Image (spheres, rainbow, N blue to C red):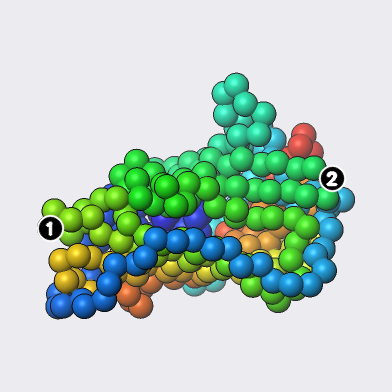
Amino acid sequence: MRKWSTRAIGLACSATALLVACGGGASGTNVLSPFPQGSQTVEPSGTRIDVSALNIFPFAGGDSVTYDRFSGGVANGTVIRVVTVAPNTTHFFMVTETDSTVTAPAVSTYVVSSSGTQEDVQLQDPLGLNASAPGVASMLSVLEEYEAPLFPVGGARSVQAQGDLGADADGDGKSDSFQFQYTQVFQGFESIAILGATRQLAYFTNTVSFTLRYTSGRADLTVSSTEDTYFAPGVGLVRRDSGAVLQNGAAVQAAYSIQARSATVGGITYP
């Protein structure tokens, strides 16, 4: 991911890298059948948690948060996230994330809607593959990244999509197949000192994986990662602990964390 745009959780391979530069799986014969076409969303049972009064997912043009970046517990850079409103729209927001350790900024587009206690934060083109892999676009043009009321603490919400890639990733003249899995667990609220105050943060664990299955007989290629995200009332994302990005189990991007240093959200400056 766009690094997969989830930020679709920040997996290391961009769309081009996933389909070309990552090069496919190890040599050998893969006798597995292509992934069948299909998708499903599984939601945990139990009473959901109303957080509408907390405003943990604020989106407004001009919102900006500056984060300290850490790797191995040592500060090694700065990350800035800025929200802009897409032209001629009211619910489309572009989040530009600039990382001082990365050459180019990452831009993600969200559709945010709310009604009463319901709020949906949808990431558009979550894998950045809509243009190069139309099969992915047809199955996964949007990812419900966050949803409120929140699901019960410890319950897993999962989204799976799989089927024809709509692209030839291994150069044998045939379209390959893919499988995508996103799992989110709301871990509850944690009291953490941040932005000059002790705040109750909504804490999530998000896990994502993307597998390519080749028609040429190469072994599957799977890219995966897990991250923990923390949201503060009125501010939004204030901390993100991104685990190492794994390619077939081997780390291809080191783990790192970001923690909010200052913010201007909804016209209010923190700390």
Q: Residue furthest right?
A: 53
**In the visual, does 109 lie left or right of 138?**
right
Q: Residue furthest left?
A: 172
Q: Where is residue 196 in the image (x, y as percent from the top left)?
A: 78, 55
* Residue 257 seen anywhere in this rendered image of the structure: no
Front-lying residue, 97 or 176: 176
Front-lying residue, 84 or 88: 88
Residue at which label 1 appears: 172
Callout 2: SS: loop
Give the CA distance from mark 2 to mark 1.
Answer: 51 Å
Q: Which mark is residue 199?
A: none
Q: Where is residue 178 in the image (x, y as percent from the top left)?
A: 35, 62
For the N terminus, give its image quadrant. Answer: bottom left
- Mark 2 and mark 1 lie on one chain; the one further toward the N terminus is 2
Q: How crowded is mark 1: few (under 14 residues within 10 Å), some or many (20 or more)?
A: few
Residue at which label 2 appears: 116
Tell me which corner region of the image, top left, top right, bottom left or bottom right, holds residue 11: bottom left
Q: Where is residue 172 in the image (x, y as percent from the top left)?
A: 12, 58
Residue ID at (54%, 52%): 143
